[in-house]
Amino acid sequence: MACEEIKNTDPNWETEEAIAENLDLPKWSTKNVVKLLEEGCTIPFIARYRKEMTGGMEVDKLRDIQSSLEELKHVQNKIATVLKAINKLGKLTQGLEKCLKNSKTITEIDDLYAPFKPGHKGTLAERARALNLEPLAITFLDRPWEGNVQQYVDPNVKGLQKLSDIETGVKHILADIIHKHKDCMDFIRGWSKFKDIKLVTSQCKPKKSGKNEDTKTVKTTEMKKVVKKEVNIKEESKHKYEQYFNSNLLVCYIKPHQVLAINRGEHNKFLTVKIEVPDKVKAMYERLCSQHFVGRAHQGTYAMNIITQAISDAYDRLAHPQMIRLIRSELTKKAEKASIEVFATNLKNLLLASPVKGKCILGLDPGFKNGCKGAVITATGQIVHTEIVYIHDYKSNKYDEKMKILQMIKQYGCEIFAIGNGVACRETETYVSNLIKQENLKMNYCVVDESGASIYSVSDQAKKELPSLDPSLRGAVSIARRLLDPLAELVKIEPKHIGVGQYQHDMPENQLKLSLDSVVEECVSFVGVDVNTGSESLLRRIAGLNSTRAKKIIEWRESKGLFVNRGQVKCVKGIGDKSYEQCAGFIRVNASLEGQTETCKEEPEETKTGRKRKKPTTGGGKAKKKKDFISLEPNILDTTWIHPESYGAAESLMQMIEVNKEDLGQEVFIREIQNYMKTKTTEELSATLAVGEPTVDLIVKAFLKPQSYDYREDFEKPLFRKEIQDINSLKNGTILTGKITNVTHFGAFVDIGVGQNGLIHVSKMKNTKLNLGDKVSVKVISLELSKKRIGLEIHCT
């Protein structure tokens, strides 16, 4: 192909169709979701307020579409870049261009581009083409009776000196043509998912070292200790992979955690990994290629023999290796996606844990030599006292330290202990349990996940919030507040520092961050944030807002008074129509005119040219509207999840039912709604109100919630205890109540109050879906205390 500029680099597939096919979703809804995402809509907004366009698609599916869309955009850009690069070299053939445009993964594109990268010697086919053997190869395909190999012999040119050299070159070109045929490429993609393909792993053979290597390297006692320690660590790590030292796993059934474990074992030189493809795959490939490239005219000809050999070579040298690369790539990709999903699901359940309202909490950040850091917070999260108690230090006066704790409890009316689950947690839990029993305290304790607390305590945000508090005590405050309101406290920390998952450190960092940030945005948005009291940490996580807009909102309310209604948010600089559309349904405003000093009016914004100031234009000109006039009237609908775009329908429905708008959230209002809905269907109301059924459903559900409703009420509440269980008292058959602390693909870990988590293997879950934070009744089925292993199963009462 001539080295002309490529005008069309678009792939031979539609983005929406590719996503729908890959995720097994309806094309119409996928197309709508892609359109909404391209328009700048956020996942929470689409999930809650555009159900009509998505068919009620769940958030996870929307995230999958968003992820696939970004991935395919990357593929499209890569196709365009590679096409231009190869074309610039003057080596772009029609077949290669077609193959590139058919590619849907980066792996496929990289395989096709590899021979053309700088420093590469080129493929065998490229070298044969450089010898001008392609016309002969094409002749063998199209006119097999005309091919004359003898005329290409040239004793002075390497590669053309013998007939066998020419045959080899022609076969390389033919193999390249065959391999790049669309049907053959589709075969490779399809059969990479074939159920009989196996992933075989074995133990890496240790490298042989020279006789004098140890004596040269280890010269001192200290160096010997270091080497011995490294060997011990290596041996300890080795045990993690013993189950894969001789394993055969079917690719179609392999679990995500197994793929990630095998990848890590291979990377750390513990495992050797091979893919075994059944011989029948090659037979089927050769049969497919023969149907395309061998016709009646080839029968009994010299060309047929060459083409048959080329087909075999195409599979052995090109198709088979590519299939293996695709299999490994797809397995890793799916395993990483599944691992990120586990991490995201666990994070979601952690963030949406039900808050402990109206309680005074004593937070304890456990420690040995440096003492346990304590912090007392009120029901609103205000810090009233901090103290360091040395309850585990043998040098301390145990009575004095106990009295410090009792004094805090008595003075501030503490009702709950919040104990961080870090170092000395078990000892602190035992101490608190004994204290409750000995002093007959009317208190419970709860073990709180302290992941990220130490990172937060030295962060700029912590310094800003708690400037006069020592970093060591900030951790105790964070632990107490995590129990009081998990979401409000955890949003202050980077999600990767608070999530719980499997192999998260092996994940692509950018993908992990995008997924976790999306989960935080979803949780904060669906719970809702009061725009007059919400912290910057919460506000910036609302769909449609960011850190800059959150700061502007806080500056506005501090300088001009509290917001009276949602519409006023549009007065804030940086929040335009799109931002407002996305965030409006997720912010809450408790109506009040107190302290309100300013509103927005519609007025033209002055245009500036250099230093001169021009008067506002009176015509159509370039004058811009600053902001529309915003009413100072409070609207009780601003306390609900109903979007302002649906206020008209909501008010019409209230008029139809004849309820007082100001009674929204009261028992009398809820009762009237319940009675009315017994006589009407959502379909009927949808037709009357001229809005979609999902919107009607959303409005009605909002009407049925009390004013005090919290979205997190439907999620698991913390597990409170009064006393600790002795691990030595456990035996097979013991029934316990525990809390899920981590969920993986192979099982769920449970805190059963003995200082060591137990594991419910997936085979022992009895079809129960478990989420992080769930309270479960479990039965002990195996004990290996020396290895710190407690096997559990779900106990059905």
Image (tube, helix red, strand yellow):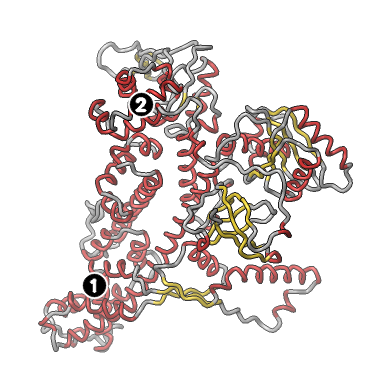
Q: Residue at x 71, y 35 (%)?
A: 362
Q: Using the image as rendered, state which of residue 351 and residue 291 is in the foreground.
A: 351
Q: Are marks 2 and 1 in contact (CB under 8 Å)?
A: no
Q: Amino acid at mark 1?
A: Ile
Q: Which mark is residue 177?
A: 1
Against 594, is 485 above or below?
A: below
Q: Residue at x 41, y 14 (%)?
A: 600
Against 406, is 625 above or below?
A: above
Q: Which mark is residue 200?
A: none
Q: Position of residue 741 (x, y in %)?
A: 59, 51
Horizontal placement of 166 versus 658: left or right?
left
Asked if one can make out residue 31 in the rendered structure from this viewpoint, the answer is yes
Asked if one can make out residue 643 in the rendered structure from this viewpoint, the answer is no
Q: Nearer the viewer, mark 2 or mark 1?
A: 2
- What's the CA distance linking mark 2 and mark 1? 72 Å
Q: Position of residue 161 (x, y in %)?
A: 27, 87
Quadrant for the N terminus, please.
Answer: bottom left
Q: Position of residue 486 (x, y in %)?
A: 58, 38
Against 74, is 413 above or below?
A: above
Q: Using the image as rendered, state which of residue 304 and residue 659 is in the foreground.
A: 659
Horizontal placement of 443 versus 121: left or right?
right
Q: Position of residue 693 (x, y in %)?
A: 29, 34
**Callout 1 secondary element:** helix
Horizontal placement of 108 versus 476: left or right?
left
Q: Amino acid at mark 2?
A: Asn
**Callout 2 secondary element:** helix
Q: Using the image as rendered, state which of residue 26 and residue 573 is in the foreground.
A: 26
Residue at image mark 2: 675
Q: Using the image as rendered, state which of residue 90 and residue 124 is in the foreground.
A: 124
Residue 62: quadrant of the picture:
top left
Q: Which callout, 2 or 1, points at the residue further toward the start of the chain?
A: 1
